């Protein structure tokens, strides 16, 4: 593209997905023109002390056949696969960078940072790039590029299988429209780093499989509008969800299922607490899909908790027979979840969430007063939301002794929503709230969470009807578990007055 702001959506795919995408010839409702293949060899340069990386700048020389190009990309935004970075390209077939060829302002900035130190090659990437130009009926133009190859830093290597959707002209929503159709049936996850980040990670020996990810801070401040805060909160949710989908596809770590479930709950809470400034019903499809996916994750997560936290810690010879039976059920649940995460519906949900977040999908076409709510300062809005959620908790939890089992479950959900609201708005809350109330909310949520885990254990163990030579051992183990944890639940509930009070 011409010098300016690069806007592109990046996703990583597996080998099977890359092979499928390589055969792309058409997309429903869009015009697709194949642009052929290029073999690209890119070498990235920096100073010996990595001065460019420290500023989020990448400098590369790329060769394709006899032609060459020098590119510098400055720091910009890179959020969950969607990159926007100032980029400058100039023709250059040399083997070392020539900063003088760049536009004056870019050359001056790089020269200042380099400060006379040598620019040395650090890592390289060799890929075959297959390209298509995609046009929407409205005239938006998107380039889709499939890169397959390897990154090399010294003796370290990593595979590259990445798809980029770059906006050539028109509305940014076209990126998501093209991606949704092209990635239909392909398991993917959003790339959260540029190719240069992959090279630096290789250089430092930090390449590994995707790992479970806890929630990221939304980084709100009191100068923001409600809409700016809404977008940052949704990004925080989307990052956690996408990262843990990728982690679960790579490994069976129970923490991945736990964090994915948390991310989906945080998203549903965010959509509820910001509903008053969103177009009516605009967030409903995302909330519905988040609930559906959470139900699929729950089967695996509940089994993880049952085995690892409730059954395995208990001693006794009969426990081995019960654990053996439960492990078979856990394996089946993980197989089911893997199929769900590879399904088209999950990919569509991830793209819809990112599109909603980045193209302001909450905007109304006929509510002229909506802009006032979105432009309002975030701090009073946050105070109102937190206060409302706190009052709901206090109202239901006023007399814990009188609560039915369903009401206890509802109280747990109210504490959870309050906890997530505190997490979203923590930087905006008074110090007294952060110091006193937040720990109490966390403590109450933990107590109610343990009680819910024990309740779920009763439901799951009651559903087991053992047969065969180990049936007796299994039944004895179930009886012991239920009795032990029933007594534990009673002891926890007897301390509820202190644990559930926000006074």
Image (cartoon, grey):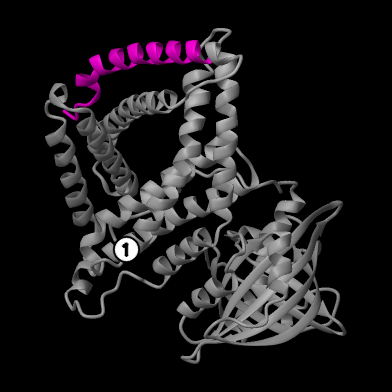
Q: Quadrant of the C terminus?
A: top left
Residue situated in front as seen by the camera: 55 or 254: 254
Whether residue 444 sits left or right of residue 210 in the image: it is: left
**Front residue of this view, candidates 169 and 184:** 184
| Helix, strand or loop: magenta stretch | helix
Corner quadrant of residue 113: bottom right
Q: Is residue 103 visible?
A: no
Q: Is residue 484 magenta?
A: yes
Q: Residue at x 33, y 24 (%)?
A: 451
Against 389, residue 302 (above or below) is: above
164 displayed left or right of 80: right
Image position of 426 with respect to 135: above or below? above
Q: State the quadrant of the N terminus.
A: bottom right
- Find residue 436 and report its horizontal and vertical position in percent: 25, 31
Instruction: Give x and y (percent) for residue 48.
Output: 77, 57
Location of residue 446 with respect to 424 vertically, above or below: above
Q: Up-down: is 16 above or below 291?
A: below
The stretch in magenta equals: 474-503
Which percent across, then down, holds residue 265? Answer: 37, 47
> Which residue matches tag 1?
283
Residue 195 position by quadrant: bottom right
Residue 4 appears in the figure: yes
Figure label count: 1
Q: Quadrant of residue 46?
A: bottom right
Q: Residue, x 57% and y 40% (percent of image)?
A: 334
Disc 1 crowd, CA 10 A, few/some/many (<14, 14-19, 20+): many
- Determine whether the residue tagged by mark 1 lies in a helix, strand or loop: loop
Residue ranking furthest to the front: 468
Magenta stretch encompasses residue 498:
yes
User: Which percent across, then down, holds residue 264?
Assistant: 41, 49
Residue at 54% x, 77% y: name it: 178
């Amino acid at each position: 593209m011409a010098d300016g702001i690069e806007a592109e959506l990046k996703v990583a795919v597996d080998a099977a997905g890359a092979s499928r995408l390589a055969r792309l010839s058409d997309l429903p409702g869009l015009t697709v023109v194949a642009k052929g293949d290029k073999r690209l060899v890119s070498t990235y340069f920096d100073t010996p002390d990595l001065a460019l990386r420290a500023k989020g700048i990448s400098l590369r020389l790329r060769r394709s056949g006899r032609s060459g190009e020098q590119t510098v990309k400055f720091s910009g935004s890179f959020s969950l696969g969607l990159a926007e970075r100032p980029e400058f390209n100039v023709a250059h077939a040399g083997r070392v960078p020539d900063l003088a060829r760049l536009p004056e302002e870019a050359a001056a900035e790089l020269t200042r940072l380099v400060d006379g130190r040598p620019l040395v090659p650090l890592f390289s990437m060799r890929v075959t790039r297959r390209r298509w130009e995609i046009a929407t009926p409205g005239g938006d133009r998107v380039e889709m590029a499939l890169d397959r190859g390897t990154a090399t830093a010294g003796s370290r290597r990593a595979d590259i299988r990445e798809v980029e959707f770059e906006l050539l002209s028109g509305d940014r929503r076209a990126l998501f429209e093209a991606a949704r159709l092209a990635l239909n049936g392909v398991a993917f996850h959003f790339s959260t780093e540029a190719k240069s980040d992959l090279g630096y990670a290789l250089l430092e020996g930090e390449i590994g499989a995707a790992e479970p990810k806890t929630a990221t801070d939304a980084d709100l401040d009191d100068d923001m509008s409600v809409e700016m805060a809404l977008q940052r909160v949704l990004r925080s949710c989307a990052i956690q969800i996408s990262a843990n989908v990728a982690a679960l596809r790579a490994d069976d770590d129970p923490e991945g299922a736990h964090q994915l479930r948390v991310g989906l709950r945080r998203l549903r809470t965010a959509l509820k607490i910001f509903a008053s400034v969103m177009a009516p019903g605009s967030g409903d499809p995302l909330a519905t899909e988040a609930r559906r996916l959470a139900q699929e994750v729950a089967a695996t997560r509940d089994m993880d908790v049952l085995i690892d936290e409730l059954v395995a810690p208990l001693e006794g010879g009969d426990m081995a027979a019960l654990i053996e039976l439960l492990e078979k059920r856990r394996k089946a649940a993980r197989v089911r979840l893997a199929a769900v995460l590879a399904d088209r519906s999950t990919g569509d949900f991830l793209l819809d969430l990112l599109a909603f977040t980045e193209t302001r999908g909450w905007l109304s076409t006929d509510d002229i007063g909506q802009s006032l709510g979105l432009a309002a300062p975030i701090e009073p809005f946050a105070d109102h939301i937190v206060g409302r959620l706190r009052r709901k908790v206090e109202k239901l939890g006023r007399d814990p002794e009188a609560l039915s089992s369903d009401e206890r479950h509802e109280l747990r959900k109210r504490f959870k929503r309050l906890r997530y609201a505190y997490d979203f708005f923590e930087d905006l809350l008074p110090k007294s709230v952060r110091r006193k109330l937040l720990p109490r909310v966390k403590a109450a949520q933990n107590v109610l969470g343990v009680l819910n885990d024990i309740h779920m254990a009763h439901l799951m163990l009651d559903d087991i009807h053992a047969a065969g030579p180990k049936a007796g051992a299994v039944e004895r183990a179930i009886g012991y578990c239920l009795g032990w944890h029933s007594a534990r639940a009673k002891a926890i509930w007897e301390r509820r007055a202190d644990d559930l009070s926000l006074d």
